[in-house]
Amino acid sequence: MPSSSFRKHPKVLFVTPEVFPLCKTGGLGDVSAALPAALLELKTDIRLLLPGYPAVLAGLKSKRKVAKLDLLPHFPPATLFSSRLQVNESVSVPLYVIHCPQLYQREGGIYLDSNGQDWPDNAQRFGLLSKTGALLASDASPLAWVPDIVHCNDWQSGLTPAYLHYHPGKKAISLMALHNLAFQGSFPPDETVKLGLPPESFSMHGVEYYGNLSFLKAGIYYATRITTVSPTYAREIQSEPLGFGLQGLLAERSNDVSGIVNGIDTVIWNPATDPHIVKQYSTRSLAAKKYNKRALQREMGLEENALIPLFAGISRLSHQKGYDLLLQIAPALISLPAQLVLLGSGDSRLEKQLITLAQTYPGKAAVRTDYDERLAHRINAGADCFLMPSRFEPCGLNQMYSQCYGTPPIVHATGGLIDTVVDLNDETLADKSASGFYFHEMTPESFMNAVRRAIGTYANTRLWKTLQHSGMNRDFSWRTSAATYLSIYSSLMQQQQSS
């Protein structure tokens, strides 16, 4: 809510369904920790709002009850706790947690049950998150602290701008951050009234999307401002196919859409100080990387050979991530010769195919179908080259991690991968800006050609070292991105004051 006089440092409520290290399924969890921490260091008065999953409540050292949320129509009774999220050794961010045992206290994942199926009451679960976000961002809040901006993230908080729109009193400005448009939170139309939205909101000029209620459509339609996680992705989603049916609305609101590349936590992801790797190193001691390669080969059961190139991938396993394409080229890649290490979980069919691949090529291919954060660090440090064949990628983080670790990535030329990786060509070779390799067509041939380009470059020790240094010297920290978000917050507050 705006104050009577303009303040340079806004108050921001950051609404998210996940945050590292308490709960994480993908990049949003990392962003939800690192971006608020960076904004806090820029003197932003920022606080997180998060559902109280079992892992969240267990992971907090202390918490204090600050409000009862038992008078919210359409939702079970809940309690609001306050705590702090320790992002790194020097920064902790204020945190609000919604404790609602009926919706959040259960075995299984954040979004899926133990059988890999969506929780049947996800509309209620994330409707409560959205409703609480709107409540805390309005003059109906039970708290003394009321934000100027409510920063919503993905579909799980997409109803917050809709609830605010229909709130009759004073309310905060809303910003809708789109991390992946493919996930939209669509539910049957009768959920609209069940979630406490007025019937008139269910229209094409509201929450309706092809006959269903869409949390994400609601956020895009009602939010004051929209951001995405890279400039290229901001352009891609305004047309087919990456608009996923929302391209018309996004194009209509193009003046309100900004693309801001995600950063990474360069304290956690730093090979010079990383406690999870065998031998720490930097651009000045890059030769020490070989010890991490040997250790990774040993850990994953691969032949310990310093000369053979080691390719790696870390990913959620889904159609988006292109691992079906990787499976098609894997035999040819291994026969170059090369080695392959993969870490990821998700689609059960892809998991089985990857396990079969490792069984077919013992000592040459290794697969772990779970997620191990510490192993992810060791893979980035030990691999020679990182594979990221995503069909689309709003931003991506792994390609930035790999560059920081002197592990040049091979990426499909899409979305944030274009914005964060510099393809090796004559021009970028001359100015020493190259940090990886593109392939442009989503075909086995195009992907394999990029692999061969990488192998040819790897054979030239001096050129490969130049490529490594270029990636390691790039600034992927949140400093620039956080400053851009702060600028948007401030401009929104000024616009509201002048209106």
Image (spheres, grey):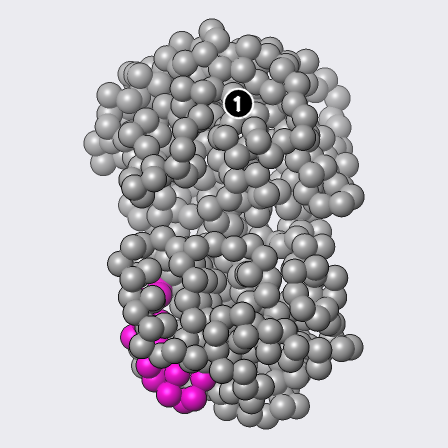
Residue 257 visible here: no
Q: Considering only vertical position in the picture, is 167 above or below 432?
A: above
Q: Please tell me which residue is depicted at 40% across the width and 63% down the height of the picture.
A: 390
Where residue 332 sits: x, y (%)?
34, 84
User: Considering the image in quadrants, where does the N terminus appear?
Assistant: top right
Q: Quadrant of residue 399?
A: bottom right
Question: Farthest residue in the top direction?
Answer: 71
The residue positioned 36% from the left and 23% from the top of the image is 124
Give the quarter of the figure containing the C terminus: top right
| Residue 163, picture quadrant | top left
Q: Is residue 331 magenta?
A: yes
Task: Name which residue type carries label 1.
Answer: Ile
Q: Where is residue 224 shown, x and y percent of the image?
A: 51, 32
Whether residue 256 sits left or right of residue 481 in the image: it is left
Q: Which residues are magenta?
A: 322-338
Locate residue 85: give its quadrant: top right
Residue depicted at x 51% and y 44%: 24
Residue 438, given in percent of the width and then of the height, sits at: 46, 75
Against 5, is 344 above or below?
Answer: below
What residue would you read off at disc 1?
A: 98
Most prominent secondary structure in the magenta stretch? helix
